[in-house]
Amino acid sequence: MPYEAPTHTVERSLRATTGAKIVAGVDEVGRGAWAGPVTVCAAITGLRRPPAGLTDSKLISPKRRTALATELESWVTAHALGHASHEEIDELGMTAALRLAAVRALEGLPVRPDAVILDGKHNYLGTPWQVRTVIKGDQSCVAVAAASVIAKVRRDKMMAELGIEHADFGFAANAGYPSPVHKAALAERGPTPYHRLSWAYLDALPQWRHLKKARSWADGNVPEIEGQLGFEF
């Protein structure tokens, strides 16, 4: 399916309206997975022409995505990744875990961005970061698209390595998301040490339900967590 190449329009707008000189694009991967960390990449690209074929990582074939990530890592001005573990997701909730991972990524950059373009409609970063949220920013903004591809490839590799000792779960293919292979292995063998245990999928597994962790975030409000639906029998 044809798509429009991402541009620097939002970055130019931020530079013009806020005086920002350094703008980072930020995107996450792993929000809807049942296992593994949530990973955030922050990328600074400047206003240079991006490599051909750059777009949202989900629109690129795995082979091309891997090659493009290698190209991007040497093309971007700077990039850094941050992770929030499955334990931190269980303890903090997804919104706080996303912020933790994003701050880790941004603080890992060699320079502090003056502004951040954040994929999506929800600003999970908040102060003191100056944030512009962009729905489908991973398709329309160069820096966010670059962050999307790098984050996806890095997390996929991480999940494949975690899955070596748990081959039945197919992490190398599903990256911890609820594929049929993953669901079947989970029902038979129960969660691996890398599963998020506060999530609703355990409600549909009577033999493993006792492992579910209670949601006891300090403020008493359960954050919205996307993609944690249970089994559909």
Image (tube, helix red, strand yellow):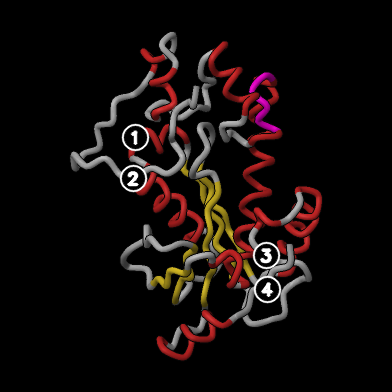
Q: Which residue is mark 3?
A: 55
**Which is nearer the eye, 123 or 103?**
123
Q: Residue at x 64, y 64 (%)?
A: 146
Residue in the image at 73% along x and 56% along y = 60
Q: Which residue is mark 4?
A: 4
Above or below, comparing residue 26 to residue 115 in the picture: above
Q: Nearer the viewer, residue 74 or 16?
A: 16
Alpha carbon of mark 2 to alpha carbon of mark 4: how far? 31 Å
Going by the numbered disc 4, the residue's amino acid type is Glu
Q: Label 4, label 3: how many angstroms apart (C-alpha)?
A: 8 Å
Q: Is residue 83 above or below residue 68?
A: above
- Mark 1 or mark 2: name the one nearer the start of the chain: 1
Q: Give the residue at mark 2.
A: 224
Q: Which residue is mark 1?
A: 91
Mark 4–mark 1 Cα distance, whole angstroms, equals 40 Å
Pointer 3 or 1: first along the chain? 3
Part of the protein shown in magenta: 168-172
Secondary structure beneath dot 3 equals loop
**SS state under label 2:** loop
Left or right, residue 162 beside residue 122: right
Q: As rendered, which of 10 and 97 lies closer to the eye?
A: 10
**What amino acid does circle 3 point to?**
Thr
Q: Amino acid at mark 2?
A: Glu
Going by the image, does 111 lie left or right of 47? Answer: left
Residue 119 spot, x, y in % from top left: 49, 63
Q: Say which of 222 and 162 sits in front.
A: 222
